[in-house]
Amino acid sequence: KMPEDSGNKLTMVTCSAPVNIAVIKYWGKRDEELILPINSSLSVTLHQDQLKTTTTVACSRSFQEDCIWLNGKEEDITQPRLQSCLREIRRLARKRRSDGEADVDAAGLSHKVHICSVNNFPTAAGLASSAAGYACLVYTLSRVMGVEGELSVVSRQGSGSACRSMYGGFVQWIMGQQGDGKDSLAQQVEPETHWPELRVLVLVVSSERKPVGSTSGMQTSVETSSLLKHRADSVVPARMKEMIEAVHKRDFTAFAELTMKDSNQFHATCLDTYPPIFYLNDVSRHVINLVHRYNRHYRETKVAYTFDAGPNAVIYTLQQNVEEFVQVVKHLFPPEINGGQFLKGLPVAPTTLSEELKQAIGMEPMVKGISYIISTKAGPGPRVVEDPSEHLLGSDGLPKESA
């Protein structure tokens, strides 16, 4: 709670929420409005020390209207998906009040909100910014308005994959059967502490915007791809079972192979869409090739790739392989002298590659293929940021001057 500000009480809460990367992909909705998927999916929540969205929500009698600022600029609050989330949280808050639940700030329910949100990574670079963004929005609003309960159902209505960012570790989005979507929700499969050796490398190919947004892309696929229907009905259900099993058992080989096959099938459905959608580019295909050659050299699946709706590769591997594999990536994509800090995130010690390994990979180095690597691991779900100096809005309810 903030001090009295010219007689108008200002309630302010700041939270952060993580990015998640699906290993069994969500692609295709059966209901556009409610964002209900045609198949279940499973993801790993990445650590917020490397990738997160931070959101401040302020609420005051003096605010004239709801407003939102994203990464420093004011955005349109009337966007339907934002409105769904706001409306839904307010409805749940009113319901709690009428059910006579304690500590619901009755006055606050009629007040307008100011929302300010920043990512610590490039937006729309195929780094799942909408998932972290909507998870953070819903989580923060729920704290301001005293709402508890199944929040993943609310964040799902902002961005489908956002429901999975409501939890840390390994998370499944159960597709559900009901028309109202009440059973289409996220559930934690294992916490982030379950598999400490698992490491994640995000190979950022480009921070340009993706040519086809995922919303329009997946609807075209639903309308035109017969492979997508086969995938949703006949492939994913068994894969979900196997993937949950692999996670429980920490079976990296099974986890890795399912992850790569599912990524490849997702991109095959994009190619089967008419007209076709290409999210992978030459650099992406170079990385795919590299991973298979690396694994073949060791006659063991040591590294896995997965790609979302964009060219960035996300690599899963175990701690003991990180140093060598990062060196392999640097070998094939020599960091540009001007590229700044090539490796961001968790430190990785440099190492040398054997001639044998270089020969086994035997690929030509590529210039400017990868702009940088984010080194990270699985992490926790959304949390409240307690330090008031971290608020993104000032006591006037407007964004603080960004440094």
Image (cartoon, helix red, strand yellow):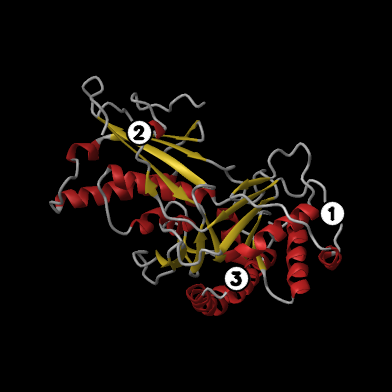
Residue highlighted by disc 2: 388
Classify the position of the N terminus by image quarter.
top left
Residue 179 higher or lower than 154, as above or below: below
Q: Is residue 268 left or right of residue 158?
A: right
Sequence-wise first label, 1 or 2:
1
Residue 113 higher or lower than 39, as above or below: above
Q: Nearer the viewer, residue 97 or 79?
A: 97
Sequence-wise first label, 3 or 1:
3
Q: Residues within 10 Å of mark 2 (few under 14, many from 20)?
A: few
Distance, label 1 to label 2, CA atoms, is: 48 Å
Q: Is residue 172 left or right of residue 181?
A: right
Tally the numbered discs.
3
Q: Mark 3–mark 1 contact, CB under 8 Å?
A: no
Residue 110 higher or lower than 320, as above or below: above
The outermost residue toward the left is 100
Q: Residues within 10 Å of mark 3 (few under 14, many from 20)?
A: many
Q: Residue at x 28, y 46 (%)?
A: 90
What secondary structure is marked by label 3?
A: helix
Question: Where does the image place residue 308, in percent across and percent down from the top left?
Answer: 61, 58
Q: Residue at x 55, y 64 (%)?
A: 197
Residue highlighted by disc 1: 365
Question: Where does the image place residue 19, in percent across and percent down from the top left?
Answer: 51, 52
Residue highlighted by disc 3: 228
Q: Nearer the viewer, residue 74 or 52?
A: 52
Q: Is residue 267 left or right of residue 162?
A: right
Q: Tell me if I can see residue 278 in this picture.
A: no
Question: Where does the image place residue 84, in percent across and percent down from the top left?
Answer: 38, 49
Amino acid at dot 1:
Pro
